[in-house]
Amino acid sequence: MADRAQFQKKLGELLAVAASQNNKMTSQEVQAFFQDDNLTDEQMNLVHEFLMSQKVEVIGYTGTIENTEKTEQEEKDTLSQQEKDYVAEYLIDIEKMAKQTEEEVTLAYYLPKVVEEAVKLHMPGIFIGDVIQEGNVSLMLYLGENKKATEAEVLPQRPITAYLRELTKKGIAFEYHNTMPFSIDGALQSGVYELEGDVSSQYVTGLLFALPLLDGDSEIRMLSRLESKPYVDLTIACLRHFGVTVYETEQGYTVPGGQQYHACDMEVEGDYSQAAFFYVANALGSDITLTNLNPESVQGDKKIVEITQQMCYNREKGLPACFDVDAADIPDLVPILAVLATFGTAPSRITGAHRLAIKESDRLASTADLLNRLGGKVTATADGLEIEPVEQLHGGTVDSCGDHRIAMCAAVAATRCTGEVTILHGECVEKSYPRFYEDYRQLGGIANVIVLES
């Protein structure tokens, strides 16, 4: 069997070939690609399954590759159980990496490694499919080839207006019709990029990953206040670990060119965005101990600690009080904060959250709908939520709208409902927290998967 690095390289090259063929390959083409590698049947089956997990249509594959006649060498090459576990684990790692979400917390961990390897191995296909988001258009362009961003588990309707404007100035050609798929032709150039700060911080983080690799120096100038700035701070802190320097200025950021990413060992700190659900569960009466959270973290969602433990906890009555929160820098906390406010002692208000309309769902509308269906009193405004407290929620059926944060909010709200809560499309938690329901059950919650007949 090829070593891990060689296996990774071959998989990346295979994805690139598939991408160049509109994500379609025949089983014979896949097998021919590895004809010099002496792969066993078990390995070939795993490769086929991996391709299909990446939305590649493998024509002629029926679920198994099996040769009736095996040479003596092939018999010797049969995978041991340990080898099978290794290959399966590695493919799962690759699949998880490809399915990471729009959040810079995750991208900051994976992308320095991915960019460096893709450039080294000339693997544009590594960016085709689930990894592509609007913040990563700049990474695609760094490879300097014609590429096509396709819709997978991304948010195809998110605007990329700033990139269309700024990249076109530098000779990049787009074929774009307000959604995916779209095509880009050209190579990323160093220089000045002027970006709005109130649409998505990913405009900034995408460029921060790619610009240091260019020959010349670059500058990112913010045309308005940068919202969700903590995500950019987190990205810069991560880049620093990998040997890349970015300087913050009064107008934005200066990025020296000619830099390289360097491998390093680092410990990935716990995610306050996910911990927020359990902080709120505690505020509503649960007793959960949370660990592996860095109190010195630059994560913006660390704000949940202050909100639940200092700002809004009514120690006399043992209940959340009320709050007025500007969520411009902590938009991911908005849905779970609405759950918290529902059980307050006075009305609460959340503002600065207009950008939630372009998340996995319109999170202002979907949060209000979720809580209102359970018996809450929540009104969505143009840039936030107004929440009237209620004594209790009664339960019911809610739609997650395919949004992982809405589904997890519903599960936490269920801890204070008098009746059962059914969450439609609850499997969407796979996007950011695949073990959520498992952890929920281990902490004493009751969560069962049901199949609804259509």
Image: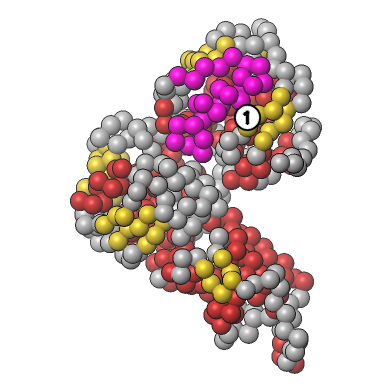
* Residue in the picture at 28% in, 61% down: 186
Q: At which x and y percent is residue 426? A: 66, 38
**Residue bearing the label numbered 1:** 409
Residue 412 is situated, as x and y percent measured from the top left of the image, at: 67, 28
Q: Nearer the viewer, residue 368 or 80?
A: 368
Seen from the viewer's position, the closer of residues 101 and 164 is 164
Q: Is residue 63 visible?
A: yes
Q: Is residue 228 above or below residue 261?
A: above
Above/below status of 205 relative to 285: below
Q: Residues within 10 Å of mark 1 (few under 14, many from 20)?
A: many
Q: Which residues are magenta?
A: 357-381
Image-quadrant location for residue 444: top right
Q: Which residue is located at x 73 percent, y 36 percent?
A: 440
On the image, the x and y values in percent for residue 298 come to: 46, 37
In magenta segment, residue 370:
yes
Q: Quadrant of the C terminus?
A: top right
Furthest-front residue in this view: 454
Which residue is most to the bottom? 72
Quarter of the image where one finds residue 420: top right
Q: Is residue 22 magenta?
A: no
